């Protein structure tokens, strides 16, 4: 009986820790925008942890080929590109990240205190080259760049979760073996 209770307690602890880690790092703002046209919006944002936050714009790679996105977003430093033998000036955004789904560009980073805020965003002039390319404006806390004590607990938790799950499995195995 003790091994069963231990197994369940360890498993529930791991599940609670994983849920907390996802809750603490979920994006504070995830707004679809169009870079091709003027837009303006206002959204309430709740910052859960005082730490460094990053404002990214992510462009969908489903809407354009790698070459087209690289040409209009730019490479690592917004360099000009050559596509089909033509030299194309990039928008000079430059890209920070590339994945199978998105191209990301860091717009701003700053330390923000925990609390409730109103986020206002506006694009004054659209860039026609981005028509038909979906984009998202995302304000997020990135654990690798964080520096608060809460994120220290996050990293400790990420190290403990595998051991907790292994402990739960061993306790369950002991409960099965010692079952009478």
Image (spheres, grey):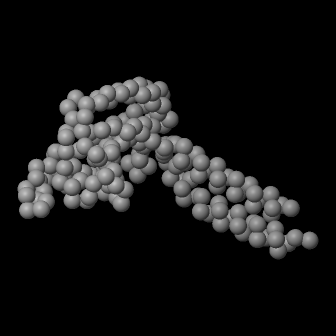
Query: In percent of the image, x 60 and y 58: which residue is there?
Result: 161
Numbered-mark total: 0
Examine the rendered structure and indicate whether residue 151 appears above or below residue 11: above
Picture coordinates of residue 88, whole percent (x, y): 10, 53
Q: Is residue 105 above or below residue 126?
A: below
**Whether residue 26 is visible:** yes
> Looking at the figure, which quarter contains the N terminus?
bottom right
Q: Is residue 50 left or right of residue 89?
A: right
Residue toward you, 170 or 56: 56
Q: Could you say where residue 74 lies in the image, as x and y percent from the top left?
A: 19, 52
For residue 53, say whether it is visible. no
Residue at image coords 48%, 37%:
49
Q: Can you say whether 133 is above or below 86 in the image?
A: above
The one nearer the camera, 178 or 121, is 121
- Measuring 87% from the left and 70% from the top, which residue is drawn there? 179
Residue 167 percent coordinates (x, y): 68, 64
Compare residues 24 and 44 and report the one nearer the observer. Answer: 44
Q: Closer to the camera, 180 or 36? A: 36
Residue at the extreme right of the image, as rendered: 180
Q: Is residue 162 rendered to the left or right of residue 64?
A: right
Quadrant of the rendered image containing residue 163: bottom right
Q: Work out which residue is located at the far bottom of the displayed protein and give it.
A: 177
Counting from the top left corner in percent of width and height, residue 67 is at: 21, 59
Residue shown at the point (92%, 71%) measured from the top left: 180
């Amino acid at each position: 009986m003790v091994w069963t209770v231990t197994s369940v307690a360890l498993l529930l602890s791991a599940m609670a820790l994983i849920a907390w880690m996802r809750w603490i790092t979920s994006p504070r703002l995830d707004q679809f925008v169009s870079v091709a046209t003027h837009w303006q919006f206002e959204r309430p944002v709740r910052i859960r942890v005082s730490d460094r936050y990053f404002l990214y714009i992510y462009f969908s790679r489903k809407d354009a080929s790698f070459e087209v996105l690289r040409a209009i977003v730019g490479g690592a430093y917004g360099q000009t590109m050559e596509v089909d033998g033509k030299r194309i000036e990039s928008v000079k955004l430059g890209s920070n990240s590339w994945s199978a789904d998105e191209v990301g560009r860091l717009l701003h980073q700053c330390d923000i205190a925990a609390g409730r805020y109103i986020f206002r965003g506006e694009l004054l002039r659209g860039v026609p080259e981005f028509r038909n390319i979906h984009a998202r404006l995302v304000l997020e806390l990135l654990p690798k760049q964080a520096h608060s004590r809460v994120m220290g607990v996050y990293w400790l938790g990420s190290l403990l979760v595998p051991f907790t799950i292994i402990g739960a499995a061993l306790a369950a195995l002991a409960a099965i073996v010692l079952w009478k």
